[in-house]
């Protein structure tokens, strides 16, 4: 596809790529479409003035500005806002939720990745809902997880689920169905919500979506793990994610990266993505479903994943 997002078979803009797919793809399960996704989708919004929420070994350094700023450089996996990611063609969002322990508002929630975000959960979900209303034929998958600080408080889950159901209303695809583009269009639905908390049983909330990744900073390891999933253990009749994301070590080896004063996680991703995208382009016959990445708003990533649908 060219720089303006123009493809060979009718995809002229990524903001509406689903509605532009060939008709023969309109009736296949969404589980069998290749869908671009973002890993730690809200990490562009991390607040360097917030307390450190993870890793545990750094929590005691929360008062040190230099530590928080270093953590920010290595925890920010995205650079584009949620709206820009949607406009770029991203349709799956990895949303990790937390409650600040001393927040005066008992139901206010944030996203997190090492640090809390500046923007609260409800404000971001409203942005997503506004976008979904403007693009009724684009199916959005929201994967809510972690719920750090909820401490088994069912009322927080109930509040969040109630807010989601009220906000998205009839746009929500109910769990237990096998959605296709055509079935969603016919029913006027375009939001799928995965809620990774086993105690919750609600027809609006899909269960956890499996996320496979290499758990390594080595590209070869990421490729090996994902290739094995697609060859031997590929889930069927459900959504699943192949995560291209690199993962920092959780031990002393992390210093090999974070002490590079002129480097950042985003720069590491920029250097790694060309090789990872070459792997993506070779996966047409293996039928990956959701492919998630850091810096997911990049056109070369989005176009590589969407093109898998044409090559299928």
Image (tube, helix red, strand yellow):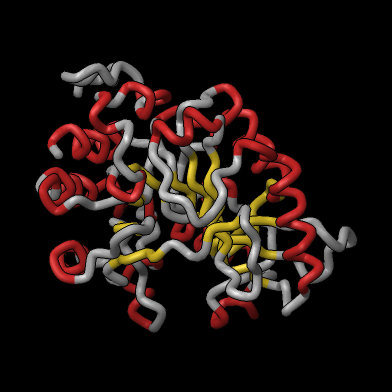
Q: Residue 99's x, y, as percent?
A: 73, 65
Residue at horizontal 41 percent and vertical 23 percent from the top: 16
The reply to whether residue 137 is in sight is: yes
Where is the N terminus found, in terms of image quarters? top left
In the rendered image, residue 61, in percent from the top left (x then y), is placed at: 62, 75
In the image: residue 248, left or right of residue 40: left
Task: Using the image as rendered, state which of residue 116 and residue 207 is in the foreground.
Answer: 207
Q: Residue 186: give x, y in percent of width and height.
A: 49, 28
Q: Residue at x 23, y 52 (%)?
A: 288
Return the residue nearer the eye: 56 or 311.
311
Q: Quadrant of residue 15?
A: top left
Q: Residue at x 77, y 75 (%)?
A: 153
- Taking the image as shown, residue 26 lies to the left or right of residue 105, namely left
Q: Is residue 97 left or right of residue 33?
A: right
Q: Is residue 155 above or below residue 133?
A: below
- In the picture, the quarter occupied by the C terminus is top left
Q: In the displayed structure, would residue 61 be above or below residue 192?
A: below
């Amino acid at each position: 596809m060219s720089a303006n997002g123009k493809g060979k078979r009718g995809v002229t803009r990524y903001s509406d790529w689903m509605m532009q797919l060939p008709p023969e793809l309109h009736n296949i399960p969404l589980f069998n479409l290749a869908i671009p996704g973002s890993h730690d989708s809200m990490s562009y919004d991390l607040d360097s003035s917030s307390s450190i929420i993870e890793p545990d070994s750094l929590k005691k350094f929360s008062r040190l500005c230099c530590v928080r700023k270093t953590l920010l450089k290595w925890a920010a996996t995205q650079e584009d806002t949620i709206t820009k990611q949607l406009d770029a063609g991203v349709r799956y969002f990895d949303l990790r939720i937390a409650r600040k322990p001393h927040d005066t508002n008992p139901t206010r929630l944030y996203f997190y990745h090492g640090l809390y975000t500046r923007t609260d959960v409800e404000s971001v979900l409203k942005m997503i809902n506004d976008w979904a209303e403007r693009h009724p034929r684009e199916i959005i998958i929201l994967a809510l997880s972690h719920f750090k600080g909820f401490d088994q408080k069912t009322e927080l889950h109930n509040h969040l689920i109630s807010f989601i159901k009220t906000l998205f209303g009839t746009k929500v695809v109910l769990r237990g169905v096998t959605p296709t583009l055509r079935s969603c269009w016919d029913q006027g639905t375009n939001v799928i919500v995965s809620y990774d908390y086993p105690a919750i049983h609600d027809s609006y909330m899909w269960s956890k979506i499996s996320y496979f990744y290499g758990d390594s900073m080595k590209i070869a390891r990421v490729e090996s793990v994902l290739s094995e999933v697609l060859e031997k253990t590929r889930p069927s009749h459900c959504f699943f994610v192949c995560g291209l994301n690199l993962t920092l070590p959780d031990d002393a080896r992390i210093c090999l990266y974070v002490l590079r004063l002129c480097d950042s996680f985003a720069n590491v991703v920029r250097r790694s993505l060309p090789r990872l995208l070459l792997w993506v382009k070779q996966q047409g016959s293996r039928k990956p479903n959701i492919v998630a990445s850091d810096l997911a708003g990049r056109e070369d990533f989005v176009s590589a994943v969407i093109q898998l649908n044409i090559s299928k």
